[in-house]
Amino acid sequence: MNREEIHFIVDSLFVGNELEQGRLQLEEDRWVNLKNFKDPIVVFASQGDNITPPQQALNWIYKVYKTVDEIKRNGQVIVYIIHPRIGHLGIFVGSKIAKREHSAIIGTVDMIEYLPPGLYEMVITDEKGDDQLLERTVEFVERGMEDILKLDDGLDDEEAFGAVSAISRYNDTMYL
């Protein structure tokens, strides 16, 4: 990526959080609103991720939709999976993760497309015998917003980011 692309990502996604707020502008008169997505959304998070923990990776769902009924009315399918311990980079490059979670996600893409609108957790269960895998099952368990919100201690700690964003944007003008 070039300098402008990296700057756009940092400024729009990380500092400004514009995608979550429906204010991400790709081009003049071209905005991205998560509510306009019609394809299923799959989110992979991990309890062991200290950079983007599950509450951060999933809170956008509540902020964008507020209720599962709203997700359903919008015709959206959102599936999330939470690993119990892998770190941030391990989600993307871990060989064990690729064999288990990535294979489960890729292997169920067709099923995900046929899920009725709603919020689901992908649950992978391994049945082992004599230290080897006998069977792996994947199921999609319907979830509610309370399942997302219970991962966090509340959203109050995010209020300070508004001021940080404003200061960051102001400081950014010094370098452009």
Image: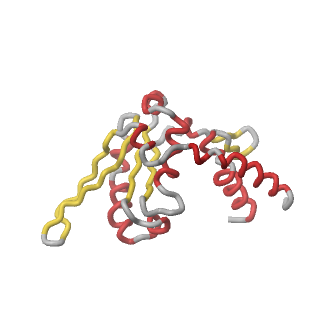
Q: Is residue 28 above or below residue 13?
A: above
| Number of numbered markers | 0
Specify whether 68 is left or right of 174: left
Residue 158 in the image: x percent, y percent?
60, 47
Residue displayed at 50% across by 33% down: 66
Q: Nearer the viewer, residue 27 or 48?
A: 48
Residue displayed at 52% across by 58% down: 52
Q: Residue furthest left?
A: 130
Residue 79 in the image: x percent, y percent?
40, 45
Residue 38 in the image: x percent, y percent?
50, 38
Residue displayed at 31% across by 45% down: 140
Residue displayed at 56% across by 36% down: 36
Residue 50 in the image: x percent, y percent?
50, 63
Specify whether 142 is left or right of 157: left
Which quadrant of the figure contains the C terminus?
A: bottom right
Colour pattern: secondary structure
Q: Is residue 161 above or below residue 93?
A: above
Which quadrant of the figure contains the N terminus?
A: bottom right
Q: Nearer the viewer, residue 80 or 112?
A: 80
Q: Is residue 168 above or below residue 28?
A: below
Specify whether 8 is left or right of 135: right
> Can you tell which quarter of the image residue 156 is in?
top right
Q: Nearer the viewer, residue 139 or 147?
A: 147
